[in-house]
């Protein structure tokens, strides 16, 4: 189970002879709590943003499916009109051909428009993916930053702390 800022805040250390400087430990824990709370907030914000983007992507997927169904329906309608025109062929051949041509042209126009819409959605999806990838890479760069390693290199020499305490108490 991961630590919470409250766990860090409530952590108490046993005191021993010549133990750690309590103020320094408390100051460090306060900084850890502050940083940890910020990381938790950022994580929550990223999760919310990811959920929003997933909802948008789902919306676009639904639109794409609807457009695909519209193409199929338009094609089926075109075929039905052609069959009906053939049944009435002798009396209304010229009129049926005009209607069939008109419907085919409309279907092609709709199909072209739908194809353009699909291409546009693909482009938007690609842009979204690129932006999201850049965001994730930026966050990874922050985690890989040398500043984290620099924090781990701090060392305290307890003899220096004790001698400086003695000097302070003598003064």
Image (tube, grey):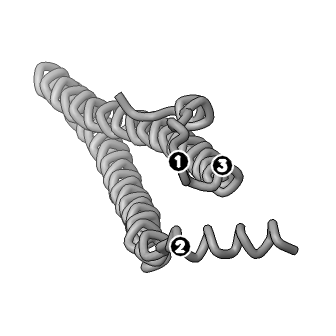
Residue wearing tag 1:
17
Percent across and percent down for residue 133 are: 37, 64
Can I make out residue 104 in this image?
yes
Q: Tag on residue 158?
A: none
Percent across and percent down for residue 87 are: 12, 20
Residue wearing tag 3:
22
**Residue 3, quarter of the rendered image:** top left
Residue at the image position 71 percent from the left and 67 percent from the top = 165
**Residue 71, quarter of the rendered image:** top left
Label 2: element kind: helix
Q: Are marks 1 and 3 in contact (CB under 8 Å)?
A: no
Percent across and percent down for residue 160 are: 58, 76
Q: Nearer the viewer, residue 171 or 100?
A: 171
Q: Quadrant of the N terminus?
A: top left
Label 1: element kind: loop
Label 3: element kind: helix
How far separated are the C-alphas under marks 2 and 3?
A: 16 Å
How far separated are the C-alphas under marks 1 and 3?
A: 13 Å
Residue at the image position 45 percent from the left and 64 percent from the top = 139
How far separated are the C-alphas under marks 2 and 1?
A: 13 Å
Q: Residues within 10 Å of mark 2 (few under 14, many from 20)?
A: few
First along the sequence among labels 1 and 3? 1
Residue at the image position 41 percent from the left and 74 percent from the top = 149
Residue at the image position 24 percent from the left and 40 percent from the top = 97
Q: Quadrant of the C terminus?
A: bottom right
First along the sequence among labels 2 and 3? 3
Percent across and percent down for residue 134 are: 42, 69
Residue wearing tag 2:
159
First along the sequence among labels 2 and 1? 1
Q: Along the horizontal axis of the image, is 27 left or right of 117? A: right
């Amino acid at each position: 189970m991961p630590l919470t800022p409250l766990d860090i805040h409530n952590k108490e250390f046993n005191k021993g002879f010549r133990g750690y400087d309590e103020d320094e430990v408390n100051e460090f824990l306060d900084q850890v709590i502050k940083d940890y709370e910020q990381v938790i907030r950022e994580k929550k914000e990223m999760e919310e943003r990811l959920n929003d983007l997933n909802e948008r992507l789902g919306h676009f997927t639904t639109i794409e499916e609807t457009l695909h169904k519209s193409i199929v329906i338009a094609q089926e309608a075109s075929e039905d009109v052609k069959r009906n025109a053939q049944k009435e062929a002798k009396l209304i051949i010229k009129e049926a051909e005009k209607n069939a041509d008109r419907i085919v042209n409309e279907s092609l126009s709709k199909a072209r428009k739908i194809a353009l819409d699909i291409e546009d959605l693909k482009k938007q999806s690609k842009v979204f993916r690129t932006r999201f990838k850049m965001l994730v890479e930026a966050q990874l760069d922050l985690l890989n930053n040398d500043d984290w390693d620099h924090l781990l290199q701090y060392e305290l020499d307890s003899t220096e702390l004790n001698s400086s305490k003695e000097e302070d108490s003598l003064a």
